[in-house]
Amino acid sequence: MALFHFIGPEERALPDYTVALVDLHPTLVILDGVNEGMGLHGMPINDPEGATAWRNRLVKPFTTAGAAVLSADHVVKDADRRTRYSFGSGHKGNALNGAMFELVNTEPFGRGRRGRSRLTVNKDRPGHLRRRGLPAPGGKFYVGDLVVDDRRTFTPILEAVLYAPKAGDEHHNEDDTEDGPSLVDQGSGGDRGPAGR
């Protein structure tokens, strides 16, 4: 754990503070809660200028230093109003230089349970990920299912595996509800192989 730094800010990150974090030479920065972070910094989430200010303050300093930045955000809860982008200004997605993923839970996770979420690529610049996926409604590309297994049936630890899609796979349909496609028991050999194998 010495390689990890956790920061739970309760006040705005001033430029000197951001410089001190960049000086730690991180290779991966995870910003969990973009809208909450924007609110903490007084940046309006529905305004393109707020999205730009967020990127300039807390994303670009790290990407400029060579780190990968993963920003966790939320979509609109009403599925009929949902777009490819997260809640707030569309500029969050428009200004993105990289990939935007969406995880949609199709089978609940939990302690002692096995759950699944569908992973789509909603934006892909410069375009290397779409070719690994299947076309899905709304201009998205289905790239797999993230399965998190805490049953500890086969391993003594929590297991997370990304299963790649197969031709003819039906999991990319947006008709999947929260009840979603049922899981195939891992011991039966019926699950698809992990991504990249």
Image (cartoon, rainbow, N blue to C red):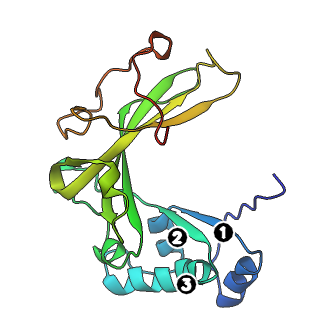
Residue 171: x, y in percent?
27, 34
Residue bearing the label numbered 1: 9
- At 60% from the left edge and 31% from the top edge, which residue is drawn? 159
Q: Is residue 42 visible?
A: no
Does the CB distance between marks 1 and 2 fall below 8 Å? yes
Q: Residue furthest right?
A: 2
Marked residue nearer the N-terminal end (2 or 3): 2
> Are circles 1 and 3 on residues that touch, CB within 8 Å?
no
Q: Earlier in the sequence, mark 1 or mark 3?
A: 1
Q: Quadrant of residue 92?
A: bottom left
Q: Residues within 10 Å of mark 3 (few under 14, many from 20)?
A: some
SS class of the residue under badge 1?
loop
Of all residues, the one furthest to the top in this rendering is 188
Vertical order, 139 against 49 (above or below): above
Q: Is residue 90 visible?
A: yes
Which residue lies under the disc numbered 3?
57
Label 2: few (<14), some or many (≥20) within 10 Å? Answer: many
In the picture of the structure, the residue carrying the numbered disc 2 is: 37
Q: Answer left or right for 172 relative to 8.
A: left
- Mark 1 residue type: Pro
Q: Is residue 150 above or below residue 54?
A: above
Which-is-in-front pick, marks 2 and 3?
Answer: 3
Question: In the image, is 92 to the left or to the right of 4?
Answer: left
Name the amino acid type tagged 3: Arg
Q: CB of mark 2 within 8 Å of CB of mark 3?
A: no
- Front residue (pair 12, 7): 7
Mark 2 residue element: helix
